[in-house]
Amino acid sequence: MGKTIVEKIFSRACGRDVKAGEFVFANVDMAMANDITAPLAIKAFKEITERVWDPKRFVIVLDHQSPADSVNAAENHKMLRNFANEQGVIFYDVGEGIAHQIMVENHVEPGMLIVGADSHTCTYGALGCFATGIGSTDLACVLALGKLWFKVPECIKFEVNGKLGKHVYGKDIVLKLIGMVGADGANYKACIFSGKVVEKLEMSDRLTMCNMAVEMGGKTGIVEPDRKTVEYLKAIRGKDYDLDSLKELKSDEDAKFDVVELDVTGMEPQVAKPHKVDNVADISEVEGIKVNQVFIGSCTNGRYEDLKIAAEILKGERVARGVRLIVIPASRREYMRALRDGLIEVFVEAGAIVEFPCCGPCMGSCMGLIASKEVSVSTSNRNFIGRQGSPEGEIYLVNPATAAATAIYGEITDPRKI
């Protein structure tokens, strides 16, 4: 029996051949924490030892309560800055962007085993690595030892074929898949996204899909590395990668997978209705619902490509009266790309509020919260009760084109009709 990409990555990390289902104590290549999860991890770490196992493999990013929105948050930020200076770990302060985007831009390599104290760490698998979210106390063990216990996951291969229609993107594909298998349909399994459609997707869409693997219970999301992976890494880092050397990360032809197939031909833009991510519908089923706020951003859809899609629809238009449009690029790099290309100007002229790179409304305790009985249309990844403010508010998850069209008309709008 051949090996999956997951088994190959864990075999390297363990220094021996391992198979799905085995419990292993594996070496970790990189670890990450944010301003919400790092304080508890550091507290637990200090009860174990005094020095981080490898300061150049641990990244702290201030992105959730950023800039500090309370005295308590400010104290946490202060403590994390001091810890980073004392330990010499990699540190990104307020305004640099969302941790997951920063990790992808600067640190993730194909074949790595990466952990992060944030559930959407699975995003990085779009570059052909194994990346998963862990708890803060688990992270403390990683900081002390550079290792962690894992159960090597089995894999589900999502074969996506057909032809994408206008204004249908990676966000719609992954929402459709989540709706098909359910919120627990991939529990503790690695979601391998493949097929002719995925092969053609740009990295931005692949990152979106892997980001939401956890919303179907997945341990991680992965797109096996290919030419687009190499081209993306060269574009953002100026570094040449040998495509032939990445072929060893391909799953063997006789590897064992569960398989889910999806033909996207004729598929409409998808919408996740309140209050579950797997409560997915075609946009034609929810058109006309009045909205109060639209959020374009997050680690799911805050990249330049997402902003460009939205700006092309918003150009020369105005945000509907009574609607708040919040736009937040995912990182400083993505912000500057949007600024240079005039996208920020389009948003501001349309009446949007453009913020510096951070998580924004997504975590529900910083900026851009919704009130009771208000409706938010969001390009983020979760629509749980209270996720963006009041527990009496409602959140609909959509792609950037749907979000932009909705902002113009003040109600959920099919972007294909504009």
Image (spheres, rainbow, N blue to C red):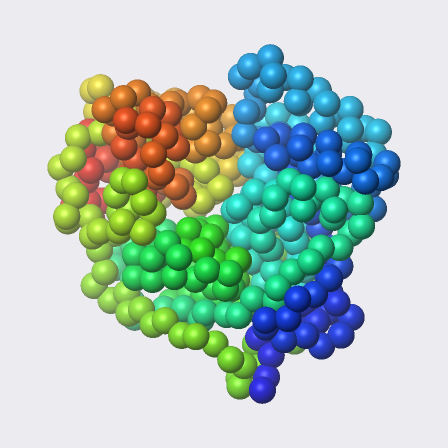
User: Residue at 59% of width from left, 39% of height from top?
Assistant: 99
Query: Is residue 228 at least partly visible in the picture?
Result: no
Q: Position of residue 355 (x, y in %)?
A: 47, 24
320 lies above or below 122: above
- Nearer-the-camera pick, 383 or 338: 383
Q: Can see residue 97?
A: yes
Relative to 132, 343 lies left or right: left
Instruction: Please report the residue visible at 22 percent of the width from the left and 29 percent of the height from the top.
Output: 291
Residue at left offset 46%, top offset 28%: 360
Q: Residue at x 43, y 25 (%)?
A: 354
Q: Answer with the quarter of the image where residue 17 lies.
A: bottom right
Compared across the picture, whether 54 is left or right of 92 comes to right
Asked where in the image residue 42 lies, by quadrant, the reply is top right
From what the image shows, is residue 183 above or below residue 357?
below
x and y percent of residue 83 in the render? 78, 28
**Position of 353 relative to 403 (above/below):** above
Point out residue 153 in the picture as x, y percentages from the top left corner.
Answer: 56, 66
